[in-house]
C-alpha cells in the first residue's frame, strides 16, 4: 500500500526524516510528505523543500493545523507553518544576496574561517577530505568566489558568519 500523504517526524530512530524523504523521491513514490520538526532552521526547511516535501510544521502545531496540512498536501498544496512561512519570506526579502548553505556547508565555512585545513576539517567533522572539498566547491559556487579566503570575506560581508 502506498499512502497518499505521510506525516514524518524529522528525527526518527533509525533514519532521519530527511533520509526518508530522499528515499521516497529516489524510489519515485507518489507519497506526499508533511514534515514535523522541532528544528525549524531555514537551512533544514530549504533542504526538505528542495527534496519535495509538501509541508513543514513545527512541533508546536496543534491537531487542527496538522489535519489541515495533511489535507492540503493530499490536494497537492504546499503547506508551511504560518510562523515558518512568515520568517522565510522575511529572510528572502532581507537577504536577497545571501546564499543558503546546508548545515554541513555552514559548519565547513565556519572551520575555514577558523583557519583549519581540508584534512583538519575532515577530522573535526568525521568526513573524508574529498567530501570537505565537495562542500568547499559548493560554498565557492554559492558565493561566486574563487578561493577559501574570498568565501570567508564574502560570508562576513553578507552576514552569514561573524
Image (cartoon, rainbow, N blue to C red):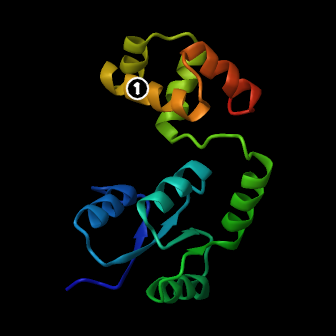
Work out whether residue 38 can be spotted.
yes
Q: Position of residue 95 (x, y in %)?
A: 75, 45
How many marks are shown on the rendered structure? 1
In this image, 2 relative to 67: left or right? left
For the C terminus, the image quarter is top right
SS label for mark 1: helix
In this image, 98 relative to 3: left or right? right
Q: Which residue is mark 1?
A: 125
Above/below status of 159 relative to 62: above
Q: Position of residue 31 (x, y in %)?
A: 33, 78
Above/below status of 92 relative to 157: below
Q: Position of residue 96 (x, y in %)?
A: 73, 47
Which of these two is toward me, 54 or 8? Answer: 54
- Residue at the spot x=56%, y=10% of the render? 115
Above/below status of 157 relative to 89: above
Q: Position of residue 152 (x, y in %)?
A: 63, 20
Residue 124 found in image quarter: top left
Above/below status of 144 relative to 39: above
Q: Residue furthest left?
A: 1
Residue 154 found in image quarter: top right
- Residue at the spot x=61%, y=52% of the render? 42
Amino acid at each position: 500500500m502506498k499512502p497518499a500523504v505521510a506525516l514524518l517526524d524529522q528525527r526518527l530512530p533509525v533514519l532521519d526524516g530527511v533520509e526518508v524523504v530522499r528515499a521516497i523521491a529516489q524510489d519515485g513514490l507518489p507519497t506526499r510528505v508533511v514534515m514535523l520538526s522541532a528544528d525549524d532552521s531555514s537551512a533544514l526547511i530549504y533542504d526538505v523543500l528542495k527534496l519535495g516535501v509538501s509541508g513543514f510544521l513545527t512541533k508546536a502545531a496543534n491537531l487542527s493545523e496538522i489535519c489541515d496540512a495533511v489535507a492540503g498536501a493530499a490536494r497537492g498544496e504546499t503547506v508551511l507553518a504560518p510562523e515558518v512561512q512568515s520568517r522565510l519570506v522575511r529572510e528572502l526579502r532581507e537577504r536577497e544576496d545571501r546564499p543558503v548553505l546546508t548545515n554541513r556547508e555552514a559548519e565547513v565555512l565556519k572551520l575555514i574561517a577558523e583557519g583549519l585545513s581540508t584534512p583538519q576539517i575532515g577530522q573535526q567533522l568525521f568526513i573524508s577530505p574529498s567530501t570537505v572539498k565537495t562542500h568547499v566547491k559548493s560554498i565557492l559556487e554559492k558565493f561566486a568566489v574563487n578561493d577559501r579566503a574570498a568565501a570567508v570575506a564574502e560570508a562576513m560581508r553578507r552576514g552569514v558568519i561573524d
